[in-house]
Image (cartoon, helix red, strand yellow):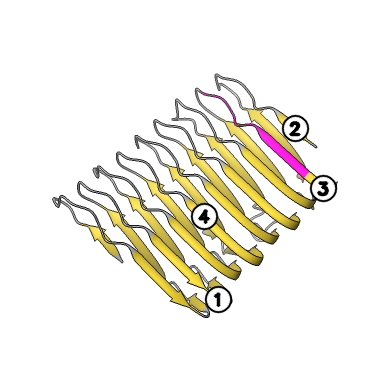
Amino acid sequence: INSVNPGAVGNAGDIQLNSGTLSASNGAFIGSSTIGKGNAGNISINARDNVSFDTDSNVRSNVFFDAVGKGGDIRVKAGTLSLTNGSQLSTNVLGTGNAGNIFVEARDSVILDGRNGNAFSSSINSDLLTDALGKGGDIQIVTGLLSITNGADISAATDGKGDAGNITINARDKVTINGFDTSSEFLSNISTSGGSNSVDNGGDIRIVTGELLLKAGGNILTSNFGIGNAGNIFVEARDSVILDGRNGNAFSSSIKSDLLTDALGKGGDIQIV
């Protein structure tokens, strides 16, 4: 981990890992943060074959409370990226500054599956948290196949003062968002949101793929709970878009943009081509 500690002024160093494969599990983490006045470092992982994180393992870039600076970017390049059982790639702002961006380039596939009990979903996320001031980071994924299952998610959110980041996915073959976690009923999803404490906008979602499949309650969602606009959704699918089924009697598979109760702003546009 690299960090700028409380009271310190300066930038944290970058972290770069090059390998054939990388495996982390059982709470292992790679991190960069600023708790003082300065920028967090960037994290780069370059693996010829597979990168896997399992059982609440994380790659994190944070701007903490009272910190002033910019979060570092996270870049992963591999054959396959797998996040399972509550593992995460995340950039967060709790102080003053912009969150880092997340870039994933996986030649074959990106797989997000499951949750760690009722705690954390396997996810790629960027959040501007309550009382934070800045901008959420963008998330960009380029791969052959993207699979999000059993309550996993990709999300960009703001609950502070600043816009949420955008999510862009370019999957050569297929994007699948399937099902929910049976113990907690969290849905598999791709989402952006503005929270109830936010005065700014949710991010846009853009997906370009061959086939998009939403099944058993899987969803794509932009929303706003506060003062600001929900993001737009753009889907370009070369072959097909399929929405199928529900999560029991609860939630349908869906593509939607919501401006929720007491929110003030505009719902996002949805375009499918």
89 in magenta: no
Residue on which the image places disc 4: 103
Secondary structure at badge 3 equals strand
Q: Name the residue: 40% across, 34% down.
A: 160
Mark 2 residue crowding within 10 angstroms, few (<14) / some (14–19) / many (20+): few
Taking 62 as reference, is 109 above or below it?
A: below
Secondary structure at badge 2 equals strand
Range covered by the magenta-colored residues: 228-236
Secondary structure at badge 1 equals loop
Disc with the residue nearer the chain's start (4 vs 1): 1
230 in magenta: yes
Marks 3 & 4, CB-CB < 8 Å contact = no
**Which image quarter: residue 1?**
bottom left
Residue on which the image places disc 3: 238
Q: Name the residue: 65% across, 65% down.
A: 111
Q: Amino acid at mark 4?
A: Phe
